[in-house]
Image (spheres, rainbow, N blue to C red):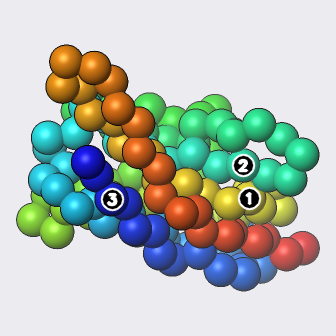
């Protein structure tokens, strides 16, 4: 089992920055994948950025060049640095982790609200 605790959301003006953190209850390198999703009102949850099982990163086209994913294994924490924020980035951001042990298990954080005001 994996518990994920997010922090760092808030209200920011257009062009501003925020950094989200997600701390896992276990060594993050034991996770198959780890990433950030977001869900805006009336829309489906979408992948924002994530680490693949091979350790590489991928980003949604809409955030490439503005968002940066990183992790600190000693702290079991993943970060999402969000710069040049736009109103369309407004959403609840969820940390996600996947574990593969005989079966695939998906875990989600509680979500953190990011609001970008124009």
Which mark lies nearer to you, 3 or 1? 3
Q: Residues within 10 Å of mark 3 (few under 14, many from 20)?
A: some
For the point 49% across and 42% down, the residue is 49
Secondary structure of the residue carrying tag 2 is: strand
Q: In the picture shown, does residue 59 fall above or below 54?
A: below
Q: In the picture shown, does residue 101 fall above or below 91?
A: above
Q: In the picture shown, does residue 68 fall above or below 54?
A: below
Residue 98's x, y, as percent?
34, 35
Q: Which mark is residue 39?
A: 2
For disc 3, the marked residue is 3
Report, in whole angstroms, how far the alpha carbon at label 3 lies from the one at label 2.
20 Å
Residue 27's x, y, as percent?
13, 53
Report, in whole angstroms, how far the alpha carbon at label 3 lies from the one at label 1.
21 Å
Q: Which mark is residue 91?
A: 1
Secondary structure of the residue carrying tag 1 is: strand
Q: Residues within 10 Å of mark 2 (few under 14, many from 20)?
A: some
Residue situated in front as seen by the camera: 86 or 80: 80
Residue 32 quadrant: top left
Of callouts 3 and 2, the N-terminal one = 3
Of callouts 1 and 2, the N-terminal one = 2
CB of mark 1 within 8 Å of CB of mark 2?
A: yes
For the point 77% across and 61% down, the residue is 90
Secondary structure of the residue carrying tag 3 is: loop
For the point 19% across and 50% down, the residue is 28
Quarter that holds the C terminus: bottom right
11 left or right of 68 in image? right
């Amino acid at each position: 089992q994996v518990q994920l605790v997010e922090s760092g959301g808030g209200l920011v003006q257009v062009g501003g920055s925020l950094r989200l953190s997600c701390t896992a209850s276990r060594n993050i390198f034991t996770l198959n994948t780890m990433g950030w999703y977001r869900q805006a009102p009336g829309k489906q949850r979408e992948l924002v950025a994530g680490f693949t099982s091979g350790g590489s990163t991928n980003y949604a086209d809409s955030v490439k060049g503005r968002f940066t994913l990183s992790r600190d294994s000693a702290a079991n924490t993943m970060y999402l640095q969000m710069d040049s924020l736009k109103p369309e980035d407004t959403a609840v951001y969820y940390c996600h982790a996947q574990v593969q042990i005989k079966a695939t298990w998906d875990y989600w954080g509680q979500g953190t609200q990011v609001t970008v005001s124009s």
